[in-house]
Amino acid sequence: MTASAAGGHDQGAREDGYEPDPKRWRALWVTLVAGFMSLLDVSIVAVALPTIQQQLHASAAEVQWVVSGYALSFGLALVTAGRLGDALDRRRIFLIALSGFVLFSAACGAAPNITLLVVARLAQGLAAGFMAPQNSALIQQMFRGGERGRAFGFFGATVGISSAVGPLTGGLILALAEGAQGWRWIFYVNVPIGILAVLLGRRLLPRTRRSGREHVDLPGVLLLGLGVLALMYPLVQAESGGLARLWWMFPAGAALLFVFTRWQRRLLNRGAQPLLDPRLFTTVRGYAVGAGVGTLYFIGFSGVWLVFALFYQHGLGFSPLESGLAVTPFALGSALAAAVSGRLVDRLGRLLTVGGLTGVILGLGGTALLLRFAPLDIAPWIAAPVLFLGGVGGGCVISPNITMTLRDVPVHMAGAAGGALQTGQRLGAAVGTAALPGLYYLVLGSRSDDYRGALFLAMGAGLVGMAASLALAAYDWRRDRRTPQPHRPCPDDVTHSPVHARQT
């Protein structure tokens, strides 16, 4: 820990009972590595699906569940897991979930048939969903002031890069692994890294000590889980006709979430602890807007990489590794910008997100134009610097938005708040990964060899989601310029929380 880092805390942070843990930066890297693995597994498997389908003699619908089942169980667990971390002990929940993730990764790699592979992937996604909200909550617990911004910068870089480098990482593993069973190493690679993270986490992660008995809102868990399931299930079944067959689940899910919201307000009025405190959206500055910006951004951002993989591998005949390398400039730009943008949040605020979204739209839009109209033998290569520009913009979106969304959340709500934020992102990702490839295949269904037209239409749809995110961010920025407001904490803020005073 450097002297400059030690000086990065606000004096007020020391006055509210917080004492910096000397192990906090090393603990941060444990959580980031674990988080990177869990988010990477959303996309890394996609490049291996043809091999898995062939080796396990699976149907297209069955093999699709290897990806969609993980995303579904991941999204279902987030808010409940975050609340359990707040109520019990984030360290304990994190280590149990990480251990389960390692165990189920090994089960995925050893699966002898598609049924057991899908079951193991569902369990692996559930473990990842329990682990994910503890990451952001532990950052809020361990850091204050300027250090929290830098820590969230690293966290945002982890989120962005894990999504972008999944195809490249999967392609590299398939290229290095020998034989038809090489796909199993996509899962096995998590095992040694995860075991090391568990051992280091036991030594470095701080405990969350509680006084009295904490209650978890079980009716709220049921209502929220069923509501999220109703919204996500048709999306993960989109390629097998789920949108047409299961359209009725969308209004049912909306109704369940409405009942959930009313139930949470009722608990709050009775003085009980809700699963997801409604005051997060009404009194915590920046939380509601940040959640909306993140959800809209992930609608376009997540689906883009599947469309790129389909275009490069099917349209241009690239190998999985070549396809991954073609989109690497975005990941590089995102990594570089995210590491810096966390330091600029306090100075630039929402303007940083507005600039980043503009860069993403210009970069990905320019790439779509080049791949549509430039000569195919050079298009992927001349698109690389434009894609890098998009990556720089992307690095200024996820990290700053996470920081601005969560930085004013009381620490005792950190897990539930992080879980709700990531639930929105998972829902956005589910919409994007269903809609964009669906549009891609729609064009190919009418014009079987028009790969460039299919890419262009799908990318355009993704850019619409990003443009909506930009409009919301720009509105928030202009509002802040007209009427700057002070920090508005929840009524039960960290400085008055007996729980917070005992956290290390």
Image (cartoon, rainbow, N blue to C red):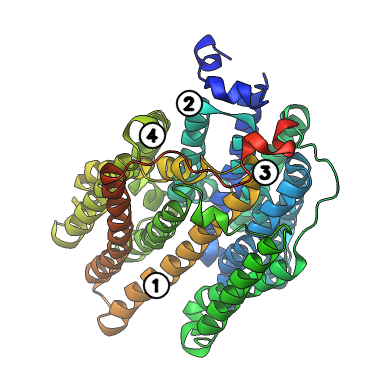
The CA span between labels 1 and 3 is 37 Å
Q: Is residue 229 visible?
A: no
**Residue that numbered label 3 is attached to:** 412
In the rendered view, would you say 325 is above or below 44?
above
- Label 2 vs 3, first from the N-terminus: 2
Q: Residues within 10 Å of mark 2 (few under 14, many from 20)?
A: some
Q: What amino acid type should be assigned to the residue bearing mark 1? A: Ala
**Residue that numbered label 1 is attached to:** 435
Horizontally, is 282 left or right of 266 in the view? left
User: Please, what secondary structure does the residue beneath circle 2 have?
Assistant: helix
In the rendered view, would you say 232 is above or below 479?
below
User: Please, what secondary structure does the residue beneath circle 3 have?
Assistant: helix
- Residue 96 position within the rendered picture, expressed as x and y whole percent measured from the top left: 78, 47
- Label 1 vs 3, first from the N-terminus: 3
Total residue callouts: 4
The CA span between labels 1 and 4 is 32 Å
Q: Residues within 10 Å of mark 3 (few under 14, many from 20)?
A: many
The CA span between labels 2 and 1 is 39 Å
Q: What amino acid type should be assigned to the residue bearing mark 2? A: Gly
Q: Residues within 10 Å of mark 1 (few under 14, many from 20)?
A: many
